[in-house]
Image (spheres, helix red, strand yellow):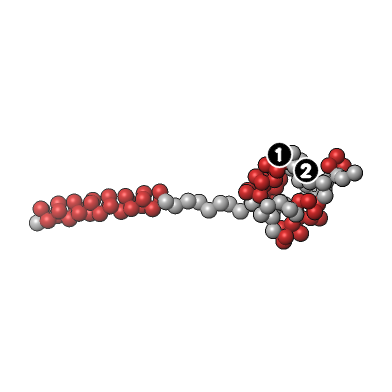
Amino acid sequence: MEQDQEGIEEIKNFLAGVHEMEEKESLRYSYDKPKRREVVLAAFDPNSADSIEFLQRGLPPFIAHTILQYRRAGGKFRTADDFSRVYGLSSEKFNMLKPYIQISEAFRRK
């Protein structure tokens, strides 16, 4: 009877260890979903805005990165409509942002 009890305890410990390993394994492949940022619609200049401003306006990180690379390469937005040509920017998103795009005098077409 005592041996049976020891055997049962051993099996319980074994199963507990297996369960613990399974939990660790499932956590290894899980990830947190990216947090949704609160969209703040406010005036911005795409020629001087930083990545945080673009993210706050509801643009995904890859579009913010594209805009910053375009500017680093010497690109400028001279009109609000120029901003509509950003790769990956949907027309819906552009139309939502268009009233808030303010191009500074230094970048406007002369």
- Amino acid found under the numbered disc labelled 1: Ala
Q: Nearer the viewer, residue 53 or 15?
A: 53
Where residue 73 is drawn, which disc sits there? 1
Q: Which residue is mark 2?
A: 76
Q: Quadrant of residue 8?
A: bottom left
Q: Nearer the viewer, residue 25 or 7?
A: 25
- Amino acid found under the numbered disc labelled 2: Lys
Q: Nearer the viewer, residue 104 or 77?
A: 77
User: Residue at left 27%, top 50%?
Assistant: 17
Residue 79, position as x, y percentages in the image: 82, 49
Residue 109, position as x, y percentages in the image: 87, 45
Image height check: is 71 above or below 6? above
Residue 27 placement, left or right of 106: left
| C-alpha gap between disc 2 and disc 1 | 9 Å
Mark 1, other Cα within 10 Å: few <14 / some 14–19 / many ≥20: few
Counting labels gives 2
Does residue 14 appear in this view? yes
User: Residue at left 66%, top 54%?
Assistant: 88
Quadrant holding the N terminus: bottom left
Q: Nearer the viewer, residue 4 or 18?
A: 18
At numbered mark 1, what does the secondary structure look like: helix, strand or loop?
loop
